[in-house]
Amino acid sequence: MITTSVAEAPEVGGADRTKAPAAARPARPGGFWTTRRRDVLTGYLFVAPQLAGVALFVLIPVGLAIWYSLNDWNVFTGKQTFVGGSHYAALAADPQLGAVLGATAIFSGGVVILNITLGLTIAIMLNRRFRGVTFFRTLFFSPVVVSVVAWTLVWGFLLQDNGGINGLLGTFGIDGPNWLQHGDTAMVSVIITQVVRSVGINLVLFLSALQGVPSELYEAARIDGAPAPAIFFTITLPLISPTVLLTAIITVVGALQSFAQIAVLTGGGPELSTTVLVFYVFQQAFEFNDIGYGSTLALMLLTFVLLLTLLQWQLRRKWVFHEN
């Protein structure tokens, strides 16, 4: 019996050495497509359409604009002549640029102030439960979905000397002006046309933000006897300040890019009273065929948009609630 057990012992030990547990085996090196690499590739595939859009419609056009601004391009012969920074030097010598920038500031300032103010005021009025509130919300938002050109053409007829606006004023014994043929009234007309059409976007954003303010805060403030202005400036405005920042950025960028309203209503006139920078870019590049100088003006417009956006973004920490 003892001999048998001793003889069998090596066989058992040998079997244990040849069949080691799976946990004790060294791990095989993974292939190229590891889980991490697959996840990274999936992420890049998801963002690829957006990156392609940014490259095709932002980076490449900006690069071409920089190149064109350094050259004189004859669109009829296709010949390009490198001129360096002469187009940038021409900005300082352009006698019309001052009036264009002034008109741009007036138009953009008027659109931004009225758009945000009216959008917030109407949103506060419609943030209540009363009969017909859905109708009024739809009414104020409906111009947003209308074609810009169609909307502007209708307003062009209304603002003529014998148009609907003056006809309405005539019923009250008021002799209305030719709105689009005088500098001051022309600028007011294009501002109001732009605001009436685009205020619906800000209205929806503000209305969504107002509905997210907890009602308990209003109830506590009313119990404490806080007046309505104090409730607005200490509760409502701070809590919707992120939305105010968003609407400010959107409205500023949209105002600086407004082209169709100017082109259809006034064509930049009378004189240069409504010639904003984006319309001046169009005139120089496509009416006067000065692609180089037009590209330089377009880069100036891009710089203004970037600077104003960065300025608003930096100021957010001082007045936007929940920002560090």
Image: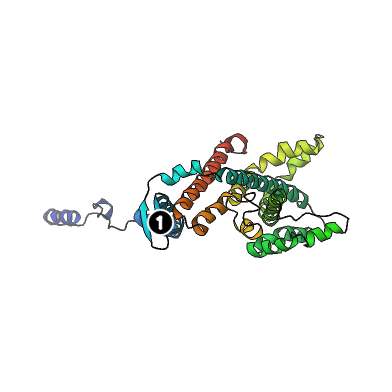
Q: Position of residue 183 (x, y in %)?
A: 69, 49
**Going 44% across and 55% down the picture, which residue do you hit?**
61
Q: Position of residue 194 (x, y in %)?
A: 67, 54
Judging depth in this view, the residue of 177 and 246 nearest the camera is: 177
The local crowd at label 1, few if under 14, some if 14 to 19, many if 20 or more residues have their Cα within 10 Å, is some
* Residue 185 higher or lower than 135, as above or below: above
**Of the residues shown, which amino acid type is indicated by label 1?**
Trp
**Going 48% across and 58% down the picture, which residue do you hit?**
289
**Going 73% across and 63% down the picture, which residue do you hit?**
157
Q: Which residue is mark 1?
A: 73
Q: Position of residue 231 (x, y in %)?
A: 76, 38
Q: Position of residue 8 (x, y in %)?
A: 14, 57
In the figure, is residue 15 to the left or right of 316? Answer: left
Judging depth in this view, the residue of 170 and 33 nearest the camera is: 170
Image mark count: 1
In the figure, is residue 191 to the left or right of 39? Answer: right
* Residue 240 higher or lower than 7, as above or below: above
Question: Does any portion of residue 144 appear in the rendered image?
Answer: yes
Question: Does any portion of residue 212 appear in the rendered image?
Answer: no
Name the image quarter holding the C terminus: top right
Judging depth in this view, the residue of 172 and 133 nearest the camera is: 172
Query: In the structure shown, which secondary structural element does the residue marked by tag 1 occupy?
Result: strand
The image quadrant of residue 9 is bottom left
* Residue 144 higher or lower than 216, as above or below: below
Name the image quarter holding the N terminus: bottom left
In the figure, is residue 168 to the left or right of 107? Answer: right
